[in-house]
Amino acid sequence: MGNGITACKGTCDFAISNDSAACGTGTGTCAQAELLEAEASGFHDENLIAATQQIRAILAAIPPDPAGRKLSFIRTNMGELLAWMDHSGAEVPDDAVTAEDDDATIAQALRLKGYAAAGATQA
């Protein structure tokens, strides 16, 4: 009963099964929620620097998960979701929803608001 997901460091993919979520080695659909800081440039101006500092402060203020999961960003075609993810390489069911599934299936598994179950188009 497992898909053989292995612990990930850096480049991970998500797997969702009911109320369980894990990340394993993959192509980048799951990453621990860490936002980098950079100096001002043509693509990262003072507004983005200030926003980055605010977001980092918000993320830092979130208490650790008692279950030891890592605060992570799940990347989908529809956008990103902040979630508690197991990055330990725990077994997940073979029928877990992953980035390889269609948007409607992913939207339903993630319980996304504003997406129709039949097509995952924004409502």
Image (cartoon, rainbow, N blue to C red):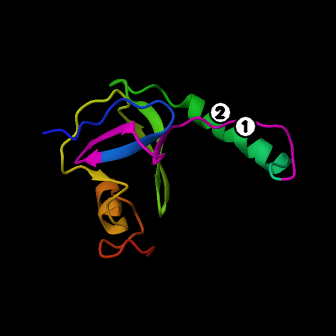
For the C terminus, the quadrant is bottom left
Question: SS class of the residue under badge 2?
Answer: helix
- Residue 62 pos. (x, y %): 51, 31
Please name the amino acid that badge 2 sits on. Answer: Ala
Q: Which residue is mark 1?
A: 53
Q: Nearer the viewer, residue 102 or 79?
A: 102
Identify the residue shown where x is 41% and y is 42%: 26
Specify the label residue 11 is tagged with: none
Question: What segment is highlighted magenta in the picture?
Answer: 16-42
Q: Is residue 43 left or right of residue 25?
A: right
Q: Quadrant of residue 90?
A: top left
Identify the residue shown where x is 65% and y is 41%: 55
Mark 2 burial class by Cα count in 10 Å: few <14, some 14-19, many 20+: few
Please name the amino acid that badge 1 sits on. Answer: Gln
- Residue 77 pos. (x, y %): 47, 62
Q: Which residue is mark 2?
A: 57
Query: Is-magenta flag for residue 24?
Result: yes
Identify the residue shown where x is 37% and y is 45%: 14
> How many angstroms separate mark 1 from mark 2 (CA)?
6 Å
Identify the residue shown where x is 30% and y is 71%: 117
Image vertical order of residue 94 relative to residue 7, above or below? below
Q: Are marks 1 and 2 in contact (CB under 8 Å)?
A: yes
For the N terminus, the quadrant is top left
- Residue 101 pos. (x, y %): 31, 61
Mark 1 burial class by Cα count in 10 Å: few <14, some 14-19, many 20+: few
Q: How many marks?
A: 2
- Residue 22 pos. (x, y %): 33, 38
